[in-house]
Amino acid sequence: MELDLSADAAALTASLVDVPSVSGEEGDLADAIESALRALPHLTVLRDGNSVVARTDLGRGQRVILAGHIDTVPVAANLPSRRERDAPSGQERLYGCGTTDMKAGVAVQLRLAAGVPDPVRDVTYVFYDCEEIEAARNGLGRLSRSHPELLGGDFAVLMEPSGCEIEGGCQGTMRAEVAAAGRRAHSARSWMGRNAIHEAGGIIDILRRYEPGQPTVDGLVYHEGLNAVGITGGVAGNVIPDRCVVTVNYRFAPDRDVAAAERHLREVFGGWDVTIVDVAPGARPGLDQGPAASFAAAVGGAPRAKLGWTDVARFAELGIPAVNYGPGISEIAHTADEYVEVPKIFDCEERMRGWLTRP
C-alpha cells in the first residue's frame, strides 16, 4: 500500500489503522512508512527490522527525537476503522484497533516529517516495532543496542496517548515473589504441620497496611503503588502446603533508582523471602532542562506525572530527557471500542508544528 502524507492527520490515521500491524507482524506497515519517507529528499532514512528511522541533518544546535511504535495489540473485531460523531458531545471520533495507541501519534509524526522540511531543531523520527509485547523484542530497545548513534539527541517526545497533555517521565515497575514457608503434613493431622498459605496472611497484612508514597519529582506528583497481583500455593487436596508465594508489583516514582526500589521492597517485607523477578527503571521528567522546557512552553497546558511505565525510560537510560505527549486516551487503549478524538489529532499536530518551526 501507499501512504498519502499530504492527507490530513485524521485521514492518515485511518489509513495507518486499516493496515493491521499486530506485534511481530508490522512488516506491511513498516514497508509503507519507509517508502513514504524515502520520497522526502530532506530526510535520511534507515531501516532496522521493522523499525524505520528518518533524520534531518541541517546542522542545528539541538536534535530532538519524536518516537512512536507502529504495532498494536491483537485485533478485536475492530477493523476497518470508522468515523462517528459522539451523540452527547457532538465530537467526532475515529474508532479502530490502534487508533489511540498509537497510530494517531504516528500519523502526527509522519505529517511533521513531510510538512516541516526546515525545522529550527534537527529531528529524528523513530517508528519502531514490538512495543506491546515482551521487552526483549522491543524495537526501540533493539535500536539502542544495535544503532545507538541513531538515538542521539537532546530531548525526546514519545507520542504515547496523553490527551495532548504533557505526561512527564514515568514510574518504574518491579515485580517480586514474596514466599511464606510452612511444613508439610497430612490434612487429617494438620496440627503436625504448618500451613504456608495461612502464613502468607502476614504478607497480605503488610500489603493492606502499606501507605503508598506520593513524592514530587521535578515539580510533578507521582502516586506509587504496592499490590498483590498473584498468589500460588498448594500441593494436593489432602496435604498441608509447605510454601506459598505472593507475587507483588511495586510501581515506584522516578526519584528512586532500581537499587533503591529493591531496598525499599526488602525493608517492607523484612523477614520474608523476597525474590525480584522483573524490573524496569523509571524516568525523571526533566522539564526544567533546555529543549524540554521550550517544548512545555510551546505546547502549553499543565504537565502531569506519567502514572505507568513507558519507553521514555529507555531514553532516560541513554541520558536523554523525554516526555509522553500525543493524541488519544490511554485508559481506553487495547479495548474493543478503542477510539481517538479527531480534534485532538489536529491539535497535537498544530502544537508540535509550532514547536518545530518557531525558535
Image: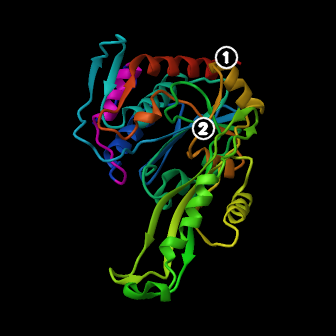
Q: Is residue 274 magenta?
A: no
Residue 163 on image: x %, y % = 50, 26
Secondary structure found at label 2: loop
> Which residue bears the numbered disc 1?
358
Q: Amino acid at mark 1?
A: Arg
Tags 2 and 1 in contact by the CB under 8 Å rule?
Answer: no
Q: Residue at x 45, y 58 (%)?
A: 134
Q: Is residue 153 left or right of residue 352?
A: right
Q: Compared to 198, does 26 lie above or below?
A: above
Q: Is residue 276 left or right of residue 84?
A: right
Return the mark for residue 306: 2
Residue 206 on image: x %, y % = 62, 59
- Judging depth in this view, the residue of 121 and 82 nearest the camera is 82
Q: Which of disc 1 and disc 2 is earlier in sequence?
A: 2
Residue 156 on image: x %, y % = 63, 37
What range is drawn magenta here?
Answer: 8-24
Mark 1 crowdedness (10 Å alpha carbons): few <14, some 14-19, many ≥20: few
Visible residue check, residue 61: no
Secondary structure found at label 1: loop
Quarter occupied by residue 218: top right
